[in-house]
Image: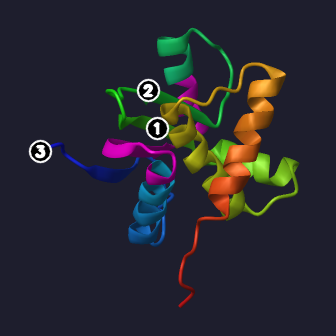
Amino acid sequence: MEQTEINFFYETAFELEKEKEYKSWIDRVIYSEEKSTGVINYIFVDDEYLHQMNVQYLDHDTLTDIISFDNSVDRVLHGDIYISIDRVKENASEFNSDFIDELNRVIIHGILHFIGYKDKSESDAGLMRQKEDEKLKMFHVEQS
């Protein structure tokens, strides 16, 4: 039986609220694209941590909001998604967006990469943005 789990790890002071709702949303997004959930790890970090990874593994000496390592097999998604909380905060400010809205976009962006969506060309980036918007509408967290 294939192992199925979505995990959240924290290498910075940030902690995601309502992890259960996030897991449910991510599962629904994966299912909506006719894929299955394997083992997916989200690791929330700061700029320095992600910058070091960017230099070490991708040979990019730049800051970024997300790095994803896709280990998917066939239709089952597996991988690690590193998210810089510092970058998400900065981007939210720059794009005049709410932090949680920007965080949700980045969370689902990594999954969309695992599904097979790209963002290097202008047309691919446009489709990625469209898919992000579509999947963000699927996010429902009960307000307490």
For label 1, the residue is 81
For label 3, the residue is 1
- Give above or below for 30 relative to 142: above
- Residue 91 falls left or right of residue 3: right
For label 2, the residue is 69
Q: Could you give the CA–CA distance between mark 1 and mark 3, rounded to whole angstroms?
A: 24 Å
- Give above or below for 20 relative to 102: below
Q: Which amino acid, by three-letter code, is at mark 2?
A: Phe
x then y, percent, for residue 110: 54, 39
Q: Which amino acid, by three-letter code, is at mark 1?
A: Ile
Q: How many marks?
A: 3
Residue 46: in sight, yes or no?
Answer: no
**Residue 35 included in the magenta stretch of the image:** yes
The residue segment tinted magenta is 31-52
Q: Residue at x 51, y 58 (%)?
A: 14
- Residue 61 falls left or right of residue 107: right
